[in-house]
Image: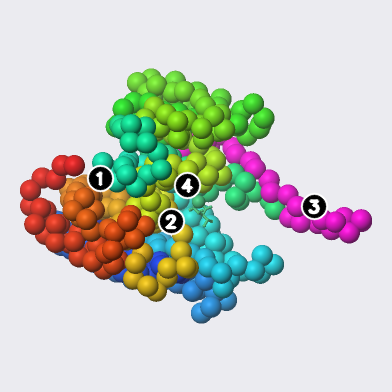
């Protein structure tokens, strides 16, 4: 395994299904170029996950893939899933691969930044004045809750069925994710909103008690408020600029981040980072765009690579510790989008490769000057 000080990193690429391979190929070019500009190098390895892995090996997450990821500094994933594997009665499903890799790598903290870029306000269905000043970060708990609790379906005597999915959280799981949220709030505008359903759910009442205690004891400088998830869903579209950092449990975070994606104009531009415990100043992480595998446009060369390229920027920042390189990539991406390098989801005509070409060109011309957005 490489170390940070050697500046020779290993990144595992998991292209997955649908448009995954197309967007990952472009993000790889950007990663390689920006690492080289920082005097670092990246060795890429490729692994199978999702439907592609099911077709090749019969399982959505082959052991080889897990082993390669465990030995790497970071992982960049495209997307998993598609109609081919969608049979609800199937024993193996592509999504199992994603859930299993999150669990196997201990990636409990999912960071989803949402900051609508000024050049894209017209692409959002929300009015421009609502979007002014929106810069929020959702911190979603990723390895607990209803996603990973006991599940089952049983036949009832009358011939009908009953199914269940258990939601549970323990104190330690809540403490560690609240700390991630509070830490980020401290580096940003100092406001943390903990989202739950404490008027109904026992897990949410525990969540609220733990969040209150951790922030009071360890983050007195962070202003904490609590919000019910239904009300938060409404405020995300009526008053999104009120939020700084949102911390919430696994399923609420899944739903709220698709909703928040609408603020940016296209789900195709949103990145995410899934992080494990800190390790020598950086963190093992898996990076992926928020969008899915988009089977309807797969293979046509028109998928938006921005979400994956911005995920690569988060990879440079959080797992490789290359903050300047991360900023340079973000700066180049928005420069390219502002100057019209846009795929059809953003109303443009550029291909996936042309958008990445524009990003690379700007990266090469601006990387030596300090980037500011
Ligand atoms: C996400 C996705 C996944 C999730 C699916 C594909 C399992 O919706 O990353 O938000 O629900 O976590
Ligand atoms: Mg989701």
The x and y percentages for residue 280 are: 30, 47
Are dots 2 and 4 in contact, CB under 8 Å? no
- Compute the Cα span from label 3 to label 4: 29 Å
The residue carrying mark 1 is 119
The residue carrying mark 2 is 291
Mark 1 and mark 4 lie on one chain; the one further toward the N terminus is 1
Q: Looking at the image, which is closer to me, 74 or 225?
A: 225
Q: Secondary structure at mark 4?
A: helix
The residue carrying mark 3 is 162
Mark 3 and mark 2 lie on one chain; the one further toward the N terminus is 3
Q: Secondary structure at mark 2?
A: loop
Q: Is residue 371 magenta?
A: no
Left of 79 or right of it: where is 100? Answer: right
Q: Is mark 4 within 8 Å of ligand 2?
A: yes
- Compute the Cα span from label 1 to label 2: 20 Å
Is the residue 96 above or below the residue 252 in the image? Answer: below
Left of 110 or right of it: where is 317? Answer: left
Residue drawn at 54 percent across, 61 percent down: 95
Visible in this render: residue 364?
yes
Left of 236 or right of it: where is 283? Answer: left
The residue carrying mark 4 is 258
- Compute the Cα span from label 2 to label 4: 9 Å
The x and y percentages for residue 51 are: 52, 71
Which class describes the residues within 10 Å of circle 3: few (<14), some (14-19), or many (20+)?
few
Are dots 3 and 4 in contact, CB under 8 Å? no
Residue drawn at 44 percent across, 20 percent down: 216
């Amino acid at each position: 395994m490489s170390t940070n000080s050697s500046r020779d990193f290993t990144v595992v690429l998991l292209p997955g299904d649908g448009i995954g391979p197309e967007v990952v190929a472009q993000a790889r070019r950007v990663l390689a170029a920006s690492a080289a500009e920082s005097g670092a190098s990246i060795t890429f390895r490729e692994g199978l996950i999702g439907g592609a892995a099911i077709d090749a090996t019969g399982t959505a997450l082959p052991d080889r893939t897990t082993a390669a990821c465990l030995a790497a500094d970071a992982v960049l994933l495209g997307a998993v899933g598609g109609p081919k594997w969608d049979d609800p009665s199937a024993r193996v499903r592509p999504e199992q691969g994603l859930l299993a890799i999150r669990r196997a790598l201990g990636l409990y903290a999912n960071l989803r930044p949402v900051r609508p870029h000024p050049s894209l306000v017209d692409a959002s269905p929300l009015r421009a004045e609502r979007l002014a000043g929106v810069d929020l970060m959702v911190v979603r708990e990723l390895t607990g809750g209803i996603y990973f609790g006991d599940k089952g379906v049983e036949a009832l005597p009358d011939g009908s069925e009953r199914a269940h999915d258990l939601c549970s959280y323990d104190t330690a799981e809540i403490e560690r994710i609240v700390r991630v949220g509070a830490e980020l709030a401290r580096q940003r505008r100092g406001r943390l909103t903990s989202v739950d359903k404490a008027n109904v759910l026992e897990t949410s009442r525990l969540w609220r008690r733990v969040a209150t205690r951790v922030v009071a004891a360890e983050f007195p400088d962070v202003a904490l408020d609590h919000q019910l998830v239904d009300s938060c869903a409404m405020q995300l579209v009526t008053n999104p600029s009120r939020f700084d950092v949102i911390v919430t449990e696994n399923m609420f975070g899944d739903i709220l981040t698709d909703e928040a994606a609408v603020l940016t104009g296209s789900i195709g531009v949103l990145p995410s980072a899934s992080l494990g415990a800190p390790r020598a100043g950086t963190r093992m992480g898996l990076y992926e765009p928020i969008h899915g595998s988009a089977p309807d446009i797969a293979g046509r060369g028109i998928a938006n690579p921005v979400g994956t390229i911005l995920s690569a920027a988060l990879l440079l920042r959080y797992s490789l510790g290359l903050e300047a390189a991360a900023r340079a990539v973000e700066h180049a991406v928005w420069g390219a989008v502002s100057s019209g390098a846009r795929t059809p989801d953003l109303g443009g005509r550029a291909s996936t490769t042309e958008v990445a070409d524009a990003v690379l060109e700007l990266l090469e011309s601006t990387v030596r000057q300090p980037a500011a957005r």
